[in-house]
């Protein structure tokens, strides 16, 4: 039995549990009939996936106990992917569960083939996420081709892209404007078996809906005023390659429905045409919007969401990528100096400090634009904070000294442990995972208690 495919089924119906026991024999099955049993098994056996019926005792006709179980499961073991089960009329409960952190939902009655597909997808994503977490414990190595960054959160996104690239799974890139979603989409394409075909990008927010349909699906001559010749759409141009749909959250309801039909059967008809065209296209989408919230508001189709988001990759904003702003700034400086045939330029120490301290609300795009402007306008061999239109920062570079950082972190951890345990040394030592003598030594070293 493969321990990495451990499945916890939380269902109060004994008949259904018996049915699932032999139908889901490909998994290592753990079975619970109520919330208490489920939480005990969760702590003891750490399942990768949980199948949770929202209707649990003491009142199986309601969903309060199921939602309580969902919240506690994700609190105790956040990495467990929870698939919730609902009745035919439970779509609103399913969407609420997704908003709380559930990975997927399944509507009763049970159809084995469909249920197994849902669970297999949950295990597939769980295994990918586990490999990403393991990779963070390994020594750092370069990010994806053409991608600059060393921070752990950004490397995690890159490793996930590497894992997903060889497959045909649809990928949804999430992140603020300017975080580099298209750069990662291109990297994914270059790492995939489709690299010899085209990478086609379109921004769904930049084109009016009336024109976007023609851009995506193409049109026949005479389909509308100005359609003077047959024109292939972006989907056709991306045949055997990758189509990148940026800002998918801005897609109109009508185009959401039409895109969903294409994703279901991979065929389209151009505007004004009748011929069904079969296509082989990998879809990669991106958005800065909260699609789950849009789903709750009825502004984004949940069935389309599950088609485009087989794998979600979250890109951290630049302010949450320690050290990457300076790394990127140096890269852009070299790139633009060469592109504009400028003499060798370098940043002043004050400029680097300003780059490191600035919050970068426009993310990588803002950084790129500021460095480009500075390269074009700088009058001397040094680029200053003023050249970047950044405020000077009165910094102390001793903050980068590892000994100082470590001592500060140690002192803060000791103070918090003592505060949480009311000054009880034994409990504080247990909380910190050290012995009492070691704790006493640290307390004397940091002068948090009298040495007596």
Image (cartoon, rainbow, N blue to C red):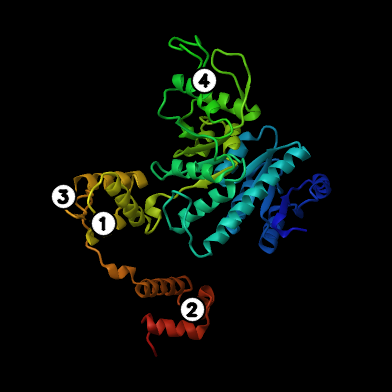
Callouts 4 and 3 close, C-beta under 8 Å: no
| Secondary-structure class at tag 4 | loop
| Secondary-structure class at tag 1 | helix
Instruction: Name the residue rendered at 62%, 40% in the picture.
Output: 168
Crowd class of label 2 (few under 14; some 14 to 19; many from 20; radius 10 Å): few
Q: Is residue 197 left or right of residue 338?
A: right
Which residue is identified by label 3?
379
Q: CA distance from mark 3 to mark 2?
A: 62 Å
The mark closer to the camera, 1 or 4, is 4
Callouts 2 and 1 close, C-beta under 8 Å: no
Which residue is identified by label 4?
218
Name the spot of residue 309 as percent of width and height, x first: 57, 40
The relative height of residue 127 versus residue 117 in the rendered view (above or below) is: below
Q: Is residue 56 left or right of residue 207?
A: right
Nearer to the camera, 451 or 326: 326
Q: CA distance from mark 2 to mark 1?
A: 43 Å
The mark closer to the camera, 3 or 2, is 3
Residue 354: numbered disc: 1
Residue 392: numbered disc: none
Crowd class of label 4 (few under 14; some 14 to 19; many from 20; radius 10 Å): many
The mark closer to the camera, 2 or 1, is 1
Q: Residue furthest left?
A: 379
């Amino acid at each position: 039995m493969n321990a990495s495919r451990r499945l916890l089924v939380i269902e109060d119906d004994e008949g259904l549990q018996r049915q699932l026991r032999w139908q889901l024999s490909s998994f290592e099955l753990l079975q619970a009939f109520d919330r208490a049993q489920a939480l005990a098994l969760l702590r003891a056996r750490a399942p990768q996936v949980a199948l949770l019926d929202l209707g649990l005792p003491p009142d199986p006709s309601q969903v309060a106990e199921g939602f309580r179980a969902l919240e506690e499961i994700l609190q105790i073991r956040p990495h467990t992917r929870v698939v919730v089960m609902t009745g035919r009329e439970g779509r609103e409960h399913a969407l609420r569960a997704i908003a709380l952190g559930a990975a997927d939902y399944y509507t009763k009655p049970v159809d084995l083939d469909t249920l197994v597909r849902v669970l297999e997808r949950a295990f597939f994503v769980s295994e990918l996420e586990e490999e990403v977490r393991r990779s963070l414990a390994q020594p750092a190595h370069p990010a994806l081709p053409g991608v600059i960054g060393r921070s752990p959160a950004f490397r995690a996104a890159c490793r996930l892209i590497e894992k997903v690239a060889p497959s045909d799974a649809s990928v949804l890139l999430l992140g603020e404007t300017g975080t580099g979603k298209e750069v990662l989409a291109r990297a994914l394409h270059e790492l995939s078996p489709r690299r010899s075909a085209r990478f086609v990008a379109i921004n769904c927010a930049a084109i009016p809906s009336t024109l976007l349909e023609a851009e995506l699906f193409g049109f026949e001559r005479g389909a509308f005023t100005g359609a003077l010749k047959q024109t292939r759409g972006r989907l056709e141009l991306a045949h055997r390659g990758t189509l990148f749909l940026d800002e998918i959250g801005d897609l109109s309801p009508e185009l959401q429905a039409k895109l969903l039909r294409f994703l279901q059967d991979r065929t389209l008809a151009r505007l004004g045409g009748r011929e069904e065209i079969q296509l082989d296209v990998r879809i990669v989408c991106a958005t800065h919007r909260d699609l789950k919230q849009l789903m709750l508001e009825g502004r984004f189709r949940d069935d389309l969401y599950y088609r485009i988001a087989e794998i979600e990759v979250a890109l951290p904003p630049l302010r949450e990528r320690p050290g990457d702003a300076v790394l990127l700034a140096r890269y852009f400086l070299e790139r633009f100096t060469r592109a504009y045939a400028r003499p060798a330029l370098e940043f002043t120490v004050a400029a680097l400090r300003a780059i490191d301290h600035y919050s970068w609300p426009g993310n990588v795009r803002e950084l790129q634009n500021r460095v480009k402007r500075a390269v074009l306008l700088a009058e001397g061999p040094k680029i200053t904070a003023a050249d970047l239109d950044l405020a000077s920062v009165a910094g102390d570079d001793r903050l980068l000294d590892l000994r100082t950082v470590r001592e500060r972190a140690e002192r803060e951890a000791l103070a918090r442990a003592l505060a949480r345990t009311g000054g009880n040394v034994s409990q504080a030592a247990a909380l910190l995972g050290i012995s009492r003598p070691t704790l006493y030594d640290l307390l004397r070293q940091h002068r948090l208690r009298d040495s007596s």
